[in-house]
Each structure stands twice: as C-alpha cells, then as structure tokens.
Image (spheres, rainbow, N blue to C red):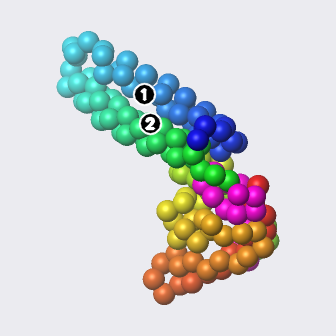
Amino acid sequence: MTATATPHTDLLASRLQDLRAERDAALAETRQEQVGDIADRATNVEASIRLGTLDERIAALELEIDAASRVEHVAGVVSLGDQVVLDLGDGPETFVVGSVEAVAAGVEAVTPTSPLGQALRGAAAGTTVSYAPRRGVTLKATIVSVG
C-alpha cells in the first residue's frame, strides 16, 4: 500500500520536524565543552536526559506516521487520523483521533488507546458509543460526522 498524506499525517510530520529541531538543540547542549562548575555539568546531564526523551518521542511519532499512512479510511467510519465531530452532551466538538503529539501541536485529540478512542474506532457517523473513562462510570458520545 502506498503512503497517503492526510491532514493528520501532515500535522504529525510537522510535529516531527519540530521535535527533531528540539533534539538538535539538546544535542548541541550535550556537546558543549565539559568544563565549568558542578552547575554547568548538571545542565549537561539534564540535556542528555532530554535528548533521550526526545529520541523516544521521535521514534514513536515516526511509527505513528507510518501506521496512520497505512490505515484504509472508509468514508463515515472512524479510524486513526480522522477528524470527528462528537457530541459528548454539551453540543458538537471537533477532535482528531490521534496521539498526544497532535495535542502538542495545538489540535484537540482523542487518543486511540483511551477508552473513548477505543469506542470510536470502527464506529460509523450517526451512532452513539459508550465508554468507561474510569471504573464505575459509563459515558456516551454521539458521532455527528467523520471527515
């Protein structure tokens, strides 16, 4: 299957570019000369830890982009990367079914592994799904549209 760009994968690719730039800055910090007082060395250790965290986020995002580009989108059925309009009881709200990296990029997202995300995936527009955000609590969401 050939990778197809979607607004979601474009957003994630932009976020990936931002993370790579942030990683480059952290890498530059870790390469600073190892001189100075203890506070300078502590800053370098923090930059090294930050570099490791960024590497993990970049790898996870690359996997998510790959997975999202391989998803076959069926019109009107929720899948990874889709924009959905949901009514959670307070009127329609727009979300993307995607990762926390989408949220970091300024988009309201429902993560696919969350209880709501799991209930939404594979459901059709016009249906109401039930999900349990925590033990003993069941909520409903109506899928107004899938785009």
Q: Which residues are magenta?
A: 74-89
- Name the quadrant of the N terminus: top right
Query: Amino acid type of disc 1?
Result: Arg
Q: Is residue 89 above or below residue 46?
A: below
Residue on which the image places disc 1: 23
Place residue 38 in its image quadrant.
top left
Asked if the residue under mark 1 is in contact with the one under mark 2, i.e. CB atoms within 8 Å, the reply is: yes
Q: Position of residue 97 (x, y in %)?
A: 62, 57
Residue on which the image places disc 2: 58
Q: Residue at horizontal 30%, vertical 15%? A: 32
Q: State left or right for residue 34 relative to residue 114.
A: left
Q: Residue at horizontal 53%, vertical 79%? A: 132
Place residue 118 in its image quadrant.
bottom right
- Spot the residue most to the front: 1
Q: Secondary structure at mark 2?
A: helix
Mark 2 or 1, nearer chain start: 1
Pick whichever, 104 or 144, lies toward us. 144
Q: Position of residue 119 (x, y in %)?
A: 58, 72
Q: Secondary structure at mark 1?
A: helix
Q: Is residue 61 above or below residue 87?
A: above
Q: State left or right for residue 114 relative to residue 107.
A: left
